[in-house]
Image (cartoon, rainbow, N blue to C red):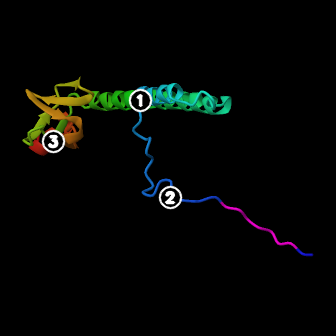
Amino acid sequence: MQTSAVNIKGQVGAQNPNGNDAFRNLDLNSFLSMMIAELQNQDPMNPLDNAQLLQQVSQIREIESNLRLVSTLENMGRSQSLTVAAGLINKTIRGLTESGDAVEGRVDRVSVDKNDVYLYVGDRKVPSKNVSEVLAQQSDATLAEMLGL
């Protein structure tokens, strides 16, 4: 008597039909609240097994680690932006103020306000992201040549 192999499959449905990660924006506090609620409401006759609990603790640690990494990368980006902006002091730039007014002139100082880096041309505040051009500095010799001296 011959037998044939039979594959048994469970119901397969679209677990995530749109392809988005439903927990992407879940922060650590929300995750902890959700896990505590799950533990408080579990069936006492069928409690969460140790493997599941360890998996959730591991997920908490991963989320926390990712949050620290994001924070570190944001700080590095802010530091880099400030360093680049500081290098523009005494250089001539063209750009736009926050209200969209065109500005051209020498950068006097640089500041950070609410994680954004600003350059000051006189009393005009230019966000570093609005700088469109850094103009080459002309040496005194080049200026003299242009003036025919």
Q: Quadrant of residue 10?
A: bottom right
Along the polypeptide, which appears first: circle 3 or circle 2? 2
Tell whether position 57 is magenta: no
Q: Secondary structure at mark 1?
A: helix
Along the polypeptide, which appears first: circle 1 or circle 3? 1
**Residue in view at x 8 percent, y 39 percent:** 99
Label 2 crowd (10 A; few <14 / some 14-19 / many >=20): few
The residue at which mark 1 appears reads as 30
What's the residue type where badge 1 is placed?
Answer: Ser
The C terminus, quarter of image: top left
Q: Is residue 148 visible?
A: no
Q: Secondary structure at mark 3?
A: strand
Which range is magenta? Answer: 3-9
Give the CA separation, mark 3 to mark 2: 49 Å
Give the CA separation, mark 2 to mark 1: 25 Å
Give the CA separation, mark 1 to mark 3: 42 Å
Tell whether position 8 is magenta: yes
Along the polypeptide, which appears first: circle 2 or circle 1? 2
**Residue in view at x 21 percent, y 33 percent:** 91
What's the residue type where badge 2 is placed?
Answer: Ala
Q: Quadrant of residue 144?
A: top left
Q: Secondary structure at mark 2?
A: loop
**Residue in view at x 10 percent, y 39 percent:** 103
**Pick the front one: 2 or 15:** 2
Q: Is residue 57 depicted above or below 139 in this figure? A: above
Q: Which mark is residue 95?
A: 3
Label 1 crowd (10 A; few <14 / some 14-19 / many >=20): few
Q: Which mark is residue 81?
A: none
Image coordinates of residue 13 in percent, x first then y, are: 53, 59
Q: Which mark is residue 14?
A: 2
Q: Quadrant of residue 2?
A: bottom right
Q: Residue furthest front?
A: 45
